[in-house]
Amino acid sequence: MPRTIDLTTPPPPARPLPLRPDGSGLVAEIEAYLASLPAPARTPAPYVCPYGSAPRPWCAGHPTPRATLLDRALRRPARPVPVTAAEHLRLASRYIGAHGWLQGAMWDETGRVCLLGAQAAVLAHGYGTPATVRTARVQLMEVLHGTGRPARSPDEYNDRPTTREGDVHLLLDRAAARAARLRL
């Protein structure tokens, strides 16, 4: 016999779902699932200060030349800090990085320097002797000729229109590496 549906009477009210999270067990099920997952691999990241970093001077890592009591009594400058030719070349590169690079002059009113100006500034600040600078300049010339960029002097290379600041830093870095290899 076919079944008839009575459309005149309303359907019975649906049973309301429990609104409490405890009643359904859903929270417990989610927590159990999350606990079964493997812990994410954490890679340690270097600490970065949220306030930024303090600027470091170009001569960081080297002692500051200090006048002794005898130097002050005789009114003479402090003895230079002994540096190798390799350290002198690295300091010259750091000096250019800190103060800026220039072509066509040793320095300008804003403090930018050329290659020779950086070497003179490192020497004037009391790092090395004139002999150290001469040895460093010989290393610069050796690298220039060894890399196929012959020049009469490092200063001529510095002032070429095709030379950029990055080229000067690369030249100083290669010459410093060569001087360190030769223990100069």
Image: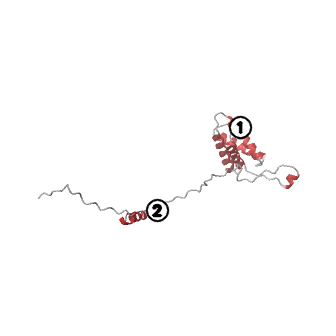
Labels in figure, total: 2
The residue labelled by disc 1 is 155
* Image quadrant where residue 113 sits: top right
The reply to whether callout 1 and callout 2 are in contact (CB within 8 Å) is no
Which residue ends up furthest to the right in the rendered image?
Answer: 74
- Provide the secondary structure element on which disc 2 rests: loop
The residue lying toward the viewer, choosing from 89 and 93, is 93
Question: In the rendering, at what x and y percent does residue 76 appear?
Answer: 85, 49
The residue located at (65%, 46%) in the rendering is: 173
- Provide the secondary structure element on which disc 1 rests: helix
- Amino acid type of disc 1? Asp
The residue lying toward the viewer, choosing from 66 and 132, is 66
Whichever of labels 1 and 2 marks the residue nearer the N terminus, that label is: 2
Left or right relative to 114: residue 12: left
Q: Is any atom of residue 153 visible in this view?
A: no
**Which numbered marker is on residue 121?**
none
C-alpha gap between disc 1 and disc 2: 59 Å
* Image quadrant where residue 115 sits: top right
**Which numbered marker is on residue 39?**
2
Question: In the rendering, at what x and y percent does residue 108 appear?
Answer: 73, 37
Question: In the rendering, at what x and y percent does residue 56 appear?
Answer: 68, 50
The residue located at (25%, 60%) in the rendering is: 12
Q: Is any atom of residue 23 visible in this view?
A: yes
Neighbor class of circle 1 (other Cα within 10 Å; few <14, some 14-19, many 20+) is: some
Neighbor class of circle 2 (other Cα within 10 Å; few <14, some 14-19, many 20+) is: few
Give the answer, above or below, for where 16 lies relative to 73. Answer: below
Q: Looking at the image, is mark 1 or mark 2 nearer the viewer?
A: 2
Question: In the rendering, at what x and y percent does residue 8 appear?
Answer: 20, 55
What is the quadrant of the N terminus in the image?
Answer: bottom left
Which residue ends up furthest to the left in the rendered image?
Answer: 1
The residue located at (71%, 37%) in the rendering is: 155
